[in-house]
Image: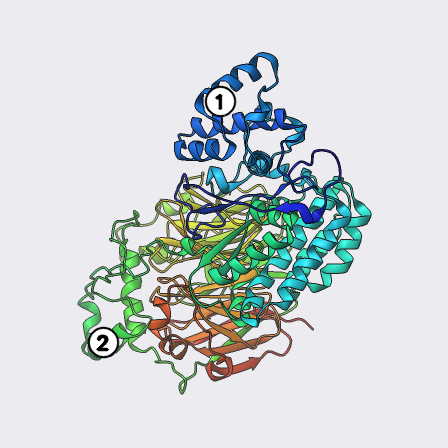
């Protein structure tokens, strides 16, 4: 707040002034970036008589004025210097003389040279950040983007932001005044301006607590907490526990609110309405918070409806800025290597070989197939280094192609069969499940810190023989791969010991030679499925690691956990190759894009981020979920992403345009697993409500109107068609569904622990 000379100031005598000036940067960090060339400046306080004569504190004001001019000149903002000098009535000679006098005696003579506008100069001074040594304590400056033009203010300034505060008894008056105004405006503007309630409520409450006004803070919370949207309940619960200044120290939630600007997307008409109201009512406390802690993304066009706003809101830091989703994303698939089928197989599979092109052709145009042609939206083949195909990989590709010829083409009239694997007597607490790509193995992670692997085929699990026994084997024999396995160790399952805490994430490598597991102990372990021993323990996270996943091409893997940072690893490096930092809360799930160039992360901050593996940049931020995200799935063609969360909703996203394109409602509890069929026609979702639901993904994506994507505001109207897209709902007896997997022939496998 602006400093008040001489004690009390009448609230009616506060003026907000617009100063025309040139933005020093690109304007991306300014709340009013799209608002022409005007920069909104904090209200100044005039004396109660209404005259603009210099006050007794004019000398201090002029010292501060000189400091501001010096700061502007230092940053080469010459035009702003000229405008400010003209407004304050200072000539260059006067400024030099005053500078000498203030440096020599600490006072500024000739206060009478400042014209009537000087009374309002204090409003500008109090919005500019300059070094504390140059500003007297009474000026109480606050950080502003208006001059610096930075997107994120200096963290030290942000952390002390709550020390500037007004009369604690007026906080309820300010908030009630704004609430009455918003409730009285036209419906089309009310929905947009109502977005202000929650961030203003949080910051005003924290400001009261920080400044030891406990009773006022409690009264403020009790009066207005009930007005907030239901999806902020969890945040408000945490907030209600902070009633003293000591509670705020080191609190993660508070740190999120302080260091990240809450993003609101508002139309220009609604914003002008708000601005005019704050000018007329001189509500400077509200205006300070808007300038300090909020980022208002102004767009031209019609205001959004309540349903459009609700669809996108709910995350810890508001919506994503439109600029965050404008980077180019190469979502296409990499060209598949040419693999010739060996002559041995031609005799027994002659019909399949002849029929293969015929069966594959329609699939090339479908959502799921990997085309032989180079996709125009695909990254270049060597954009990131990928491992070369081994002979065993080529053999597996051939098997995959043969299986694909027998694949059932799913659709709304051809639903998949579902096979459910129930983990009985899982008293150890089943926490994670994964299947190999060929569906031959299943692994489970447990709360007792073990990982268990089962064979789901008649073929039993065997270890490799000891070194002494291997030396006796004829390496040139045709069946050498069989001979190296020790029949004495054959069993249907193996238990892997090594973690010292519950195992929360597991992932098989594409070649079925390795298994990854992540744990509460902060490590990710790589296990050999030849020896069933731990090969490496990757230590980079300091807190529990909630999820890990192998790249579709092997070699790389990603992990994410409580430290809010996702890490990209390579199996042969003990340090991470990339660290993806930006989430405001735990990273709860991770997924690789089918082309391995991107990684998606879902978080407890209720956002999904897409990261570029090449440079570590965040290229997409998706908001709309109302709870922590626990499931992610890319469509097989790489164009779309599906996400599921504790709010029981499945949201569909277009990666290329960076927009939400669908909402599937039906589940009544947390969604833990999502999976597209091999061709992408069906999306399956598994939930803690003990159901598997099948959705018509083809219809959801085909119904999109491409005109919607070209809208300047980037908002589309989501159709309420969940019931039309729901193809089937299948209840388990009493088993939450925690993993789903489509076999190569499109049989759906599901898994969960029986919960009697």
Q: Is residue 252 left or right of residue 358?
A: right
Q: Secondary structure at mark 1?
A: helix
x, y percent for residue 350? 19, 77
Label 2 environment density (alpha carbons within 10 Å; few <14, some 14–19, many ≥20): few
The vertical placement of 471 against 81, above or below, is below
Which residue is depicted at the point 28% across and 76% down? Answer: 405
Which residue is depicted at the point 41% across and 84% down? Answer: 412
The answer to the question of whether label 2 and label 1 lie on touching residues, with beta carbons closer than 8 A, is: no
Say which residue label 1 marks: 95
Q: Is residue 433 visible?
A: no
Return the residue nearer the eye: 80 or 418.
80
The vertical placement of 163 against 608, above or below, is above
Q: Is residue 418 left or right of residue 165?
A: left
The vertical placement of 609 against 671, above or below, is above
Q: CA distance from mark 2 to mark 1?
A: 79 Å
x, y percent for residue 343? 17, 67
Residue positioned most to the bottom: 413
Residue positioned most to the right: 215
């Amino acid at each position: 707040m602006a400093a008040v000379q001489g004690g009390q100031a009448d609230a009616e005598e506060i003026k907000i002034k617009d100063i025309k000036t040139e933005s020093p940067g690109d304007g991306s960090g300014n709340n009013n970036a799209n608002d022409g060339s005007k920069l909104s400046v904090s209200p100044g306080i005039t004396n109660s008589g209404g005259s603009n004569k210099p006050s007794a504190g004019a000398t201090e004001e002029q010292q501060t004025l000189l400091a501001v001019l010096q700061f502007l000149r230092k940053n080469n903002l010459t035009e702003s210097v000229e405008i400010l000098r003209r407004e304050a009535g200072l000539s260059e000679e006067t400024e030099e003389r005053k500078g000498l006098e203030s440096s020599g005696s600490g006072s500024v003579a000739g206060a009478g040279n400042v014209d009537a506008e000087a009374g309002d100069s204090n409003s500008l001074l109090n919005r500019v950040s300059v070094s504390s040594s140059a500003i007297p304590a009474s000026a109480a400056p606050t950080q502003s983007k208006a001059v610096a033009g930075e997107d994120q203010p200096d963290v030290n300034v942000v952390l002390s932001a709550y020390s500037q505060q007004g009369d604690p008894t007026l906080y309820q008056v300010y908030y009630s005044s704004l609430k009455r105004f918003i409730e009285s405006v036209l419906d089309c503007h009310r929905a947009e301006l109502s977005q202000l309630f929650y961030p203003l409520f949080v910051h005003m409450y924290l400001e009261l607590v920080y400044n030891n006004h406990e009773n006022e803070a409690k009264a403020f919370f009790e009066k207005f907490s009930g007005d907030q949207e239901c999806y902020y309940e969890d945040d408000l619960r945490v907030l209600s526990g902070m009633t003293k200044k000591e509670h705020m120290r080191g609190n993660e939630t508070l740190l999120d609110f302080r260091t990240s600007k809450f993003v609101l997307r508002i139309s220009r008409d609604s914003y002008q309405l708000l601005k005019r109201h704050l000018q007329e009512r001189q509500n400077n406390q509200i205006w300070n918070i808007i300038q300090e802690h909020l980022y208002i993304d102004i767009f031209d066009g019609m205001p959004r409806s309540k349903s459009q706003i609700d669809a996108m809101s709910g995350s810890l830091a508001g919506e994503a800025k439109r600029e965050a989703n404008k980077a180019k994303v190469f979502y296409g698939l990499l060209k598949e290597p040419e693999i010739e089928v060996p002559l041995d197989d031609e005799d027994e599979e002659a019909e399949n070989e002849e029929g293969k092109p015929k069966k594959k052709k329609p699939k090339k145009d479908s959502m799921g197939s990997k085309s032989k042609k180079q996709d125009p939206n695909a990254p270049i083949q060597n954009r990131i280094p990928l491992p070369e195909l081994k002979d065993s990989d080529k053999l597996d590709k051939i098997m995959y192609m043969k299986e694909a010829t027998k694949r059932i083409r799913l659709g709304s009239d051809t639903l998949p069969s579902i096979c459910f694997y129930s983990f009985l007597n899982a008293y150890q607490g089943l926490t994670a499940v994964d299947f190999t790509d060929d569906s031959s193995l299943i692994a489970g992670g447990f709360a007792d810190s073990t990982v268990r692997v089962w064979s789901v085929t008649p073929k039993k699990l065997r270890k490799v023989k000891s070194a002494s026994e291997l030396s006796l084997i004829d390496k040139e024999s045709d069946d050498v791969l069989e001979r190296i396995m020790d029949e004495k160790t054959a069993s249907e399952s193996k238990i892997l010991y090594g973690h010292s805490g519950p195992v929360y994430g597991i992932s098989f490598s594409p070649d079925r030679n390795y298994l990854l597991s992540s744990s509460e102990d902060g490590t990710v372990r790589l296990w050999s499925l030849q020896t069933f021993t731990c090969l490496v323990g990757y230590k980079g996270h300091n807190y529990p690691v909630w999820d890990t996943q192998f790249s579709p091409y092997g070699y790389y893997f990603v992990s994410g956990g409580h430290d809010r940072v996702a890490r990209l690893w390579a199996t042969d490096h003990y340090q991470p190759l990339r660290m993806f930092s930006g989430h405001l809360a735990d990273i709860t799930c991770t997924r690789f894009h089918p082309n391995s160039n991107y990684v998606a992360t879902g978080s407890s901050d209720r956002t999904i981020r897409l990261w570029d593996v090449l440079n570590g940049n965040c290229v997409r931020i998706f908001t709309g979920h109302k709870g922590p995200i626990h499931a992610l799935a890319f469509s097989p063609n790489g164009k779309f992403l599906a996400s599921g969360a504790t709010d029981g909703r499945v949201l569909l996203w277009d990666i290329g345009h960076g927009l939400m394109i669908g909402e599937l409602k039906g589940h009544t509890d947390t969604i833990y697993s999502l999976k597209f069929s091999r061709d992408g026609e069906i999306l399956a979702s598994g939930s803690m409500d003990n159901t598997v639901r099948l959705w018509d993904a083809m219809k959801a994506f085909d119904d999109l109107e491409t005109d919607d994507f070209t809208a300047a505001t980037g908002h589309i109207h989501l159709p309420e068609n969940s019931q039309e897209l729901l193809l089937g709902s299948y209840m388990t007896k009493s088993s939450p569904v925690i993993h789903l997997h489509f076999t190569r022939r499109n049989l759906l496998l599901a898994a969960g622990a029986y919960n009697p």
